[in-house]
Image: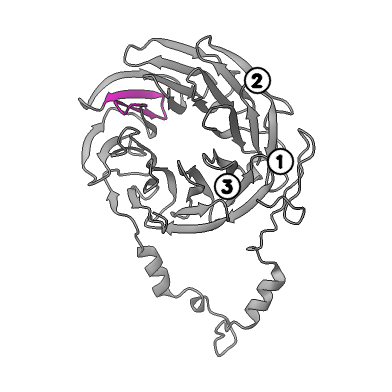
């Protein structure tokens, strides 16, 4: 990777941030574009008016609308589908939750429903298989959480809490964590129900993740603070706040493979790299200088999703305004800005390559090569925004959840496969 001054600006100091500008050769300046358009016939009509039809004909728009690259469409939901999860053991089962107060466990091969997760009273916004795929948890906005045994298709546990913000299974035990609007994080052994509470700061717990060692969790809050928790002791080992914290609510979290680093994203337009052993902020990333203050956080380019590459020292940060930024982890230099046509909802790195996938508000899934910053492929089929998606282990399949009331299975083909 080129660290020359021509295409990167180095960070200076631990906490001073300067905007990093990507001068990737693939980007064109306005003069280049103007030169290209000089030779383009824009199809003026006889009276001199340019018609929109000369750019996008009705036939072309209809063709784009009807394009469906998916292998299978799951259509049981009668409202927006908010969330999707694949079973980690075999990647053969999906669970989806939606606006219709329902969740379904179904086979990705043929769309057949194994069972419906009944009894929810509000939109199902969290669905997750346990680490060994034996259990599936479903949670709705009212705070009703249910756990089902996949083998028997029976509900084995339920609990009602306050407004639910997020849910996460322990990586190697039947322990479920859930973050609440009041800031508390609940932790239960399933199905026994033994419970522990991680006391919050009195503001919303917006995101959380159990670290790979299974002993610690990182939790983000509405006030911009981040807490690292010792799950056994039930106490916070580090609190990242003030100048080190975010200037707005956290939106997303990710950790690297060994859990030594955590990446946080916020509505303040920044992503922060944190050492989980020391609680120190190692880097701050922003595509627009991160000039947000608490007051204007709503107008800033919110970070929607973050992630670490497993095979190269790269991280990805996805923004509400459609930019996917690829940074070099070692030098903290911006490598590529991959621009999307609409806001990015979520990103996911492939397990064993440098390809990162995104789902967007324009209803498309895109695969990007992080080494070059180029788009590898694009998949369409939804008639509304994609609200969640997940990849299987081999990254040969994506399962999406959309506002068009459908979930879809896409077969991801790449030349090197």
Q: Residues within 10 Å of mark 3 (few under 14, many from 20)?
A: many
From the viewer's perspective, is residue 5 above or below residue 256? below
Q: Position of residue 135 (x, y in %)?
A: 30, 25
Label 2 Cα crowd, 10 Å radius (few <14 / some 14-19 / many 20+): some
| Residue 282 shows in this picture | yes
Q: Is residue 160 left or right of residue 246?
A: left
Q: Quadrant of the C terminus?
A: bottom left
State which region is magenta.
130-149
Residue 4 image position (x, y, % from top left): 74, 53
Q: Are marks 1 and 2 in contact (CB under 8 Å)?
A: no
Q: Name the residue tied to disc 3.
A: 320
Res 157 quadrant in image:
top left
Residue behind mark 2: 239
Precedes in sequence: disc 1 or disc 2: 2
Magenta segment: does it hold 406? no
Percent coordinates x, y for residue 41 in the rendering: 57, 84
The residue sitting at 71% across, 28% down in the picture is 244
Spot the residue most to the bottom. 46
Secondary structure found at label 1 = loop
């Amino acid at each position: 990777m080129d660290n020359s001054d021509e295409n990167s600006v180095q960070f200076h100091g631990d906490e001073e941030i300067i905007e990093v500008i990507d001068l990737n050769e693939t980007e064109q300046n306005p003069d280049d574009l103007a030169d290209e358009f000089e030779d383009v016939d824009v199809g003026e009509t006889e009276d001199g008016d340019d018609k929109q039809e000369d750019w996008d004909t009705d036939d072309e728009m209809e063709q784009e609308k009807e394009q469906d690259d998916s292998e299978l469409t799951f259509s049981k939901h009668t409202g927006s589908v908010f969330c999707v999860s694949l079973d980690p053991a075999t990647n053969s089962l999906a669970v989806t939750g939606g606006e219709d107060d329902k969740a379904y466990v179904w086979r990705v091969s043929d769309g057949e429903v194994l069972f419906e997760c009944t009894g929810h009273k509000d939109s199902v916004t969290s669905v997750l298989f346990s680490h060994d795929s034996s259990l599936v948890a479903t949670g709705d906005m009212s705070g009703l959480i249910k756990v089902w045994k996949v083998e028997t298709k029976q509900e084995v546990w339920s609990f009602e809490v306050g407004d639910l913000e997020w849910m996460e299974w322990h990586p190697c035990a039947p322990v479920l964590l859930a973050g609440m609007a009041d800031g508390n994080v609940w932790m239960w052994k399933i199905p026994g129900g033994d419970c522990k509470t991680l006391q919050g700061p009195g503001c919303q717990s917006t995101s959380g993740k159990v670290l790979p060692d299974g002993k610690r969790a990182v939790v983000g809050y509405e006030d911009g603070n981040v807490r690292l928790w010792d799950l056994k002791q039930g106490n916070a080992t580090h609190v990242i706040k003030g100048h080190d914290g975010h200037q707005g609510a956290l939106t997303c979290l990710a950790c690297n493979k060994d859990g030594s680093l955590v990446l946080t994203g916020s509505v303040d337009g920044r992503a922060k790299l944190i050492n989980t052993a020391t609680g120190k902020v190692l880097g701050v990333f922003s595509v627009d200088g991160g000039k947000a203050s608490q007051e204007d956080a709503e107008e800033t380019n919110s970070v929607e999703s973050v992630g670490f590459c497993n095979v190269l020292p790269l991280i990805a940060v996805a923004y509400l305004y459609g930019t996917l930024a690829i940074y070099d982890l070692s030098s903290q230099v911006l490598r590529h800005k991959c621009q999307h046509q609409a806001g990015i909802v979520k990103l996911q790195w492939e397990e064993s390559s440098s390809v990162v996938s995104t789902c967007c508000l324009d209803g498309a899934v895109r695969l990007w090569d992080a080494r070059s910053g180029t788009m590898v492929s694009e998949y369409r089929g939804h008639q509304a925004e994609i609200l969640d998606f997940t990849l299987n282990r081999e990254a040969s399949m994506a399962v999406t959840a959309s506002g068009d009331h459908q979930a879809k299975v896409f077969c991801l083909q790449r030349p090197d496969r």
